[in-house]
Amino acid sequence: MTLEGKLLIGQSAVSGSSRPIDAINPATNERLAPTYMGGTRTEVERACELAETAFTTFRETSPETRAAFLDTVASEIEGIGDTLIERAMAETGLPRARLEGERGRTCGQLRLFANVVRAGEWLDVRIDPAMPDRQPMPRADLRQRHIGLGPVAVFGASNFPLAFSVAGGDTASALAAGCPVIVKGHSAHPGTSELVGRAVQRAVTACGLPEGTFSLLFGSGSEIGQALVADPRIQAVGFTGSRGGGNALMKTAQARPQPIPVYAEMSSINPVFLMPEALKARGEQIADGFVGSLNMGAGQFCTNPGLVIAIKSPELDDFIAAAAEGVKDSASQTMLTPGIHDAYEQGVARLSSSHKVRESARGQVGASPNQCRAGLFVTTAEDFLNEPELQEEVFGATSLVIECADHNDLRRVASQLEGQLTITLQLDDGDLPAARALMPIVERKAGRVLANGWPTGVEVCHAMVHGGPYPATSDSRTTSVGSAAIFRFLRPVCYQALPEALLPEPLKDGNPWQVSRLVDGKRE
Amino acid sequence: MTLEGKLLIGQSAVSGSSRPIDAINPATNERLAPTYMGGTRTEVERACELAETAFTTFRETSPETRAAFLDTVASEIEGIGDTLIERAMAETGLPRARLEGERGRTCGQLRLFANVVRAGEWLDVRIDPAMPDRQPMPRADLRQRHIGLGPVAVFGASNFPLAFSVAGGDTASALAAGCPVIVKGHSAHPGTSELVGRAVQRAVTACGLPEGTFSLLFGSGSEIGQALVADPRIQAVGFTGSRGGGNALMKTAQARPQPIPVYAEMSSINPVFLMPEALKARGEQIADGFVGSLNMGAGQFCTNPGLVIAIKSPELDDFIAAAAEGVKDSASQTMLTPGIHDAYEQGVARLSSSHKVRESARGQVGASPNQCRAGLFVTTAEDFLNEPELQEEVFGATSLVIECADHNDLRRVASQLEGQLTITLQLDDGDLPAARALMPIVERKAGRVLANGWPTGVEVCHAMVHGGPYPATSDSRTTSVGSAAIFRFLRPVCYQALPEALLPEPLKDGNPWQVSRLVDGKRE
């Protein structure tokens, strides 16, 4: 499988003619061939035209056809073999084990959505039968199902080159919803993107689907992405990245003649509350777990624990000391891109130079380029509450401990937090009353609340919420991981008194797809 | 029950100090006492403060408590008796039978949501049990439920002074979701609003709920409404009204430091396709049904059939002639406000003066002020496609017939339609092939597709979608009528490995609320 450095427009592979994109090996700062010439509005136009055409057919495929397609995408990705892992390692600096795990997760995610499509909960079928004799007015037969919104634009993220990229969660859930997908590949891993994109392309052919079901664009800067979001045929956007990037896409989407939803997962510092009894009982163990979570993927997880909140006490001092030891011993790790490494260094420098913050520990200095040195800093609740910029995400393996005077202080800090993907409580039985008082605050701030675990590691399942209030995401009513992610790309349609011959399959008498239905408000 | 002309802030009734609002009887242009002094930012601030406080308690009320509250609101509204109907008649010009029907619908809607709360589908409970022995990584226990977004701002609509106003669908569904509601009452029916607002106030007391669960503000102009939507404690907005009004609220909501969702139901002309065989078989009967639907509530329904699309034929000529007879015979009807009447006259004048449109009929001239004269106009597909302003809603009993050359033309017109609340097909068996070709187009354009009925009359049930793509609404993924309307005000939260003592009731082992759950992706 030789990389060609091309954009994939439907079944074609075409050369772009805009600015070149070269992948960089962040461990060496070396360029990786081939060069990807960025796309232009011509390719955006063509991809959108194909997607619009494909939508008519693709959205009405049977559950089995669509599920088989998702399964085929998974098999095709696995079929790339080690070439994929090696290219992803070179482009991201991430270690083999992590990328093999991420590939497993990505393919598992595609297969989960295949089963979601088969199970049919996403259709949310509701039937209110006719009541011709009702007084004073008869009731017509009313049936509801969900249909896909239309072509979806997906922006690949840098930090999960497989699971949140070309065939990641956004793409899988949009395809599951019956929406063609146009991916804007991340410029940090174009080769990985091309490999996965071609796997999807092959699956489209193998399953006899219209070619516009999937396209993959590249482009440096924001031109291609903005053109894509502004195109009238695009009906929704999936994005994982920075707050600035997400906000810019939201703005474009809202300024369209027809505004469309943007699902942007942006910024979260994932606070961890260390409750007093837990600290007393197992402070050192918690410190170990914390440092492990902090260092995962060089701290480049959306759910990295960037904030630790606890009441000042000798046990907290011991925790900080133990965590500081762990951080000092932390080996440096290659970050995803030189740009991310620069931003990390600036973020750490901002903390280091603040009079309100004291440096507790820094990790090992790296020998190669773009290495992340872990960091641990400490401040007081008072200072944290007075300095809003201390809530700004430092993307990488750095965390800030906030010392509170008492439980009241703890709740004040909780109340001032911005929206988060996760909030974690480390607690023991003796902490339950205080934790109970915290719950109503934290569940308004986060999409996921954890006890005695660590936020890194997002299970792909039915109950998962990888979402949360702004700025964690642009839409707190949704999740970008787990089976409920499909609902982002669906809308309900009601059919009133339609003859059986015009009713969509899942609404027909006899329930041919055998899906769960709400009949007169009762679950069947 | 004497009207006091006051704002209702929690359990208080307070006098505003901003510009005065006087209700006008549109049938006579007479002012109706009392004067309502508009609220200021002080009252917005106080109502939001109370709502925020109330949210903590109200959102965690048991299903039975919340359901009993909704039932009590319904009983309290019925308890007002004829005073409510008489005041509403005076303020809106709508006839008694219509308002009595609307009251029944409003109370039925509140009781439907009471049952929705009890049934618990809105919680969308999902449980993925722990798998401690899973390889390579164990799975933690993960449970999901939905919680209320927070305090909601609801804007009363002029055209349904009960069903889309103070205790209408937006309020009922937001309360059902556990969200306190602050209503900005419509200035056209402040007395009706006060009566209903006091009924809700009494229900709050009777059910022992925190006073901030409900407040009612008045204010002329947009100041109060904009201040409400901009308040950081407000977490969602329900609105039914003009496209301009909805767009302005969306803009404010998106410009907040934390953007919030706006559910605006705005603009729809509800196209009706008359298929050839149906026209042949029963053109006259269809004309009767059409004129009846057109005249309902002086054409001031969101689902009024403002567009008729058919293929040019002798049968279509007959239909137009029959419909014209019906329109000519249509008695004039009082419109809701002098402003709405003025806008209607301007809209009709725009059609009358267009060279692309021919006037087919006008209804009876009224003897009293603010009377709606029905109108029927005709144009060609060619002209309709070339003149985008012919798609603009004329709010009132006027409709435009579009003559198409053939089926191809029909589909071209369908493809050019803006988003709609409803699209109707009048069809016979012989029309099925052509209708089947239209379906993929129309279901992308509308929230509800009807066969052989009329769009006016929106059933309040589980399968209803009163929504649709922009500009019909601001969010095509939602409905503002029917039980699914509750999902607009909810967001999912995932709980990972929480001790039983901290789990919310509906997620506890043993399913104490006995709600439907998705366990490992399977419905239980």
Image (cartoon, coloured by chain):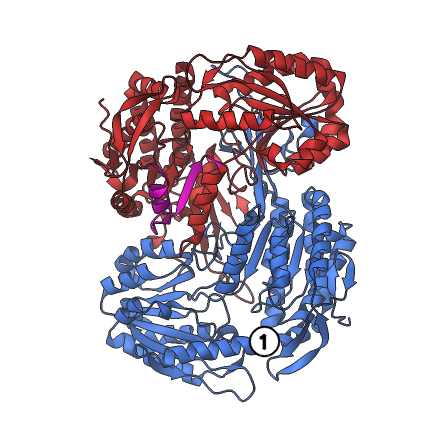
Chain colours: A blue, B red
On whether residue B228 falls in the magenta region, the answer is yes
Count neighbours of disc 1 (C-alpha within 10 A) and say few if under 14, some if 14 to 19, many if 20 or more: many
Q: Is residue B151 visible?
A: no
Q: Residue at x 22, y 66 (%)?
A: A406
Q: Is residue A452 left or right of residue B12?
A: right
Residue A451 % position (x, y): 38, 61
* Kind of residue indicated by mark 1: Leu
- Near-viewer residue (A248 or A415): A248
- The single residue placed furthest to the bottom in the displayed view is A367
The secondary element bearing badge 1 is classed as loop
Q: Which of B112 and A493 is in front in this view?
A: A493
* In the image, residue A75 above or below residue A133: below
Residue A412: x and y in percent read: 27, 61
* Quadrant hosting residue A215: bottom right
> On the rendered image, what quadrant is the N terminus of chain A found in?
bottom right
* Residue at the image point whose x is 25% and y is 45% from the top: B42
Q: Nearer the viewer, residue A328 or B503?
A: A328
Above or below, B114 against A190 in this view is: above
Name the quadrant containing residue A164.
bottom right
Quadrant of the drawing holding the C terminus of chain A: top right
The residue beneath circle 1 is A94
Q: Is residue A58 visible?
A: yes
> Magenta segment, which residues?
B220-242
Residue B180: x and y in percent read 33, 41
Residue B281 shown in magenta: no
Residue A2 % position (x, y):
77, 72
Chain of the residue displaying label 1: A
